Amino acid sequence: MLRISKLTDYATVLLASLSGADGGLTSASELAESTGIGLPTVSKLLKELQRAGLVRSTRGARGGYQLARPADEITAAQIIDAVEGPVALTECASDHGSCDLEASCRVGHSWQQVSMAIRSSLQELRLTTLIAHDATVRAPDLGAALGRGGWRPLTRV
């Protein structure tokens, strides 16, 4: 099953909360209280999101966190990358040369195409869409993203 981690889910919740702050600063403890996520987890995620350039921090008594750019410029792919690293379904889809079977594999290229299609869809999905209560998220046409009119069955090895 493909599933994002709880930490990525929590990071999205934190970013959504920051997007509602209208550019103002919000402390880690305020975020923990308003979201119900533990302060140690909030602090850890804010550091990762800051390292990825998704949030900005200001130190001091009146300091806190805010989005580094507008919510409609933050993608689901960027959030996942910040917490989990790049999306890849298989070893060969993430880094060439890291699979012992790569030289003789007949399906790796297909999995790489699927990974690229999923990544492309995640890059199109914006934080504003993720937080919209009344938004309908359309399932992407992965067949089109793969350069086909639809899915073709994979040939057995």
Image: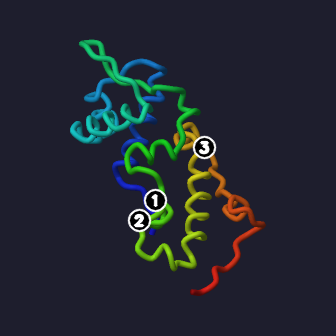
Discs 2, 3 touching: Cβ within 8 Å: no
Residue 121 in percent (x, y) is at: 61, 52
In front here: 46 or 10? 46
Res 14 quadrant in image: top left
Callout 3 crowding tier (Cα within 10 Å): few <14, some 14–19, many ≥20:
few
Instruction: List the residue tagged with mark 3.
Output: 134
Picture residue at 47% right of the left edge, 20% below the top: 23
Q: What whole-number distance in Å separates the C-alpha atoms at marks 3 and 1?
A: 38 Å
Discs 3, 1 touching: Cβ within 8 Å: no
Above or below for 22 versus 1: above
Instruction: List the residue tagged with mark 1.
Output: 95
Residue 58 in percent (x, y) is at: 33, 18
Under mark 3, the amino acid is Asp
Foreground disc of the pair 2, 3: 2
Instruction: List the residue tagged with mark 2.
Output: 98
Discs 2, 1 touching: Cβ within 8 Å: yes
**Left or right of 79: which side holds 63?**
left
Res 152 quadrant in image: bottom right
Of mark 2 and mark 3, the one earlier in the sequence is 2
Figure label count: 3
For mark 1, give the secondary structure.
loop
Residue 117 in percent (x, y) is at: 62, 58
For the rendered model, the colour scheme is rainbow
